[in-house]
Amino acid sequence: SLIVKLRKSGEIASRNNANALNMLPKKLTWSKAAMKHPHNAFIVNIPVEVKEELYEAAMSAYEDGVSVDELDAAGYFPVDSFSALRSFSVSVRNSLLHETGLVLLKGLDLDTFSAMDELADPDQVVACSKLAYYIICSHIGTVDGSVRGKLFDVKNNHINAMDGKNDNVLFSVSDCEASWHTDGASKDKVYDCVGLLCINPSRVGGKSKITNSCNAFDQVENILPQFIMHELTRPIPRDILENGKGRGNDDIGTQLSRADSIMHLRISYNSYPIYVTQKGRMRFRYMRHWIETAHQKVHWRLPTMLRIAMDVLDDTLTEGCCFHERLERGDILICNNSCVAHGRDAFQDVPGQPSRHLVRAWMQCHGVDLYEASKR
């Protein structure tokens, strides 16, 4: 018999795997000036030449019948297709990983796709918008489609994520409030950055809110005694969210894997700290709801010290919120998923009006950043 070991090339490995759990991101705090004037600190207007490249490429791919799931931006388009976008993406990635950790891109006019094709219907505009969004995200980092696809539609599917009877339901498919959180609840999977494209803004409610979890850590550390602060830095069990659409347990396999005896083992394993810190580096992973439901499902009482620590943390994150606004059509909000917490107000869709529709992308950016730095 012959045993052969295969290894990815150094380039691919560095781009795709360097973002692993053992790579602790930089700790990025915001100055008082940035928090007082968030529009000056975080808003970036997409240059005209970048938008022209995106419009042309997205329309070309759509006309060829290529969807986002089929598109390989690096291999599908000619090498010289995105000279302006490449340069722009480097500056955006640098802001996300080394400067502010937050960028709000403005200026992408989704209605341009209607103007480019007089026969375009709303579905075509959405498809072209997703293609343009995916192209820009794939230049900022590597879009991670391993869990819920390359892009995920964030819109109301009329399921109450807060209802204890609804197991394995994401807030992304609900209209209820989403409290302060970072994306991803698995111990074994982290995402460097989270992007949200606004296709249709909410009509009632649905404002996005942003705060800096690194600033919050410094403040909480000065408030809490060490034995309570320890609750934020020790492994804490989290609920299990299955891969897929996040709309409940709609198949036998999922139902079996979520039996009480199995869930007890899975949740016990799925434990990790809210904060991990080390010499100017930090990772923040949090959503209080998944911590509370994890304890409920394994029939553990939520520790009093942990509850106090999370109460103080939630209040501090709220006090540090410097952006609480409704995203506009065409806006692209991108957060560093280790340093920035985000949330959303509850919202209501209005009959006769387009429903609130955002599109999420998870990106791995540290590996790309290291690879690009190695070439300089």
Image: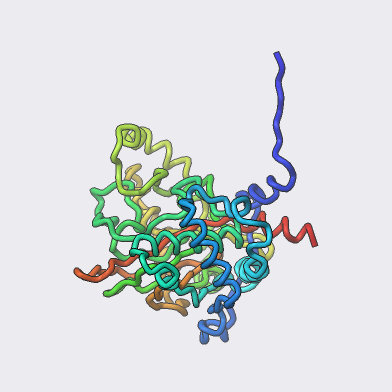
Image quadrant of residue 249?
Answer: top left
Name the residue nearer the viewer: 282 or 351.
351
Query: Where residue 149 sits: x, y (%)?
Result: 46, 49
Name the residue nearer the viewer: 254 or 285.
254
Q: Which residue occupies 39% across, 67% down?
A: 199
Q: Which residue occupies 51% across, 70% down?
A: 220
Q: Is residue 87 left or right of residue 230?
A: right
Identity of the residue furthest to the left in this view: 351
Q: How is the image coloured?
A: rainbow
Query: Where residue 243 sits: x, y (%)?
Result: 42, 44
Q: Which residue occupies 53% across, 45% down?
A: 188
Q: Is residue 53 visible?
A: yes
Q: Is residue 305 visible?
A: no
Name the residue nearer the viewer: 343 or 262.
343
Query: Where residue 326 sits: x, y (%)?
Result: 37, 76
Q: Which residue occupies 24% across, 57% down?
A: 158
Name the residue nearer the viewer: 198 or 369.
198
**Quadrant that contains the N terminus:** top right
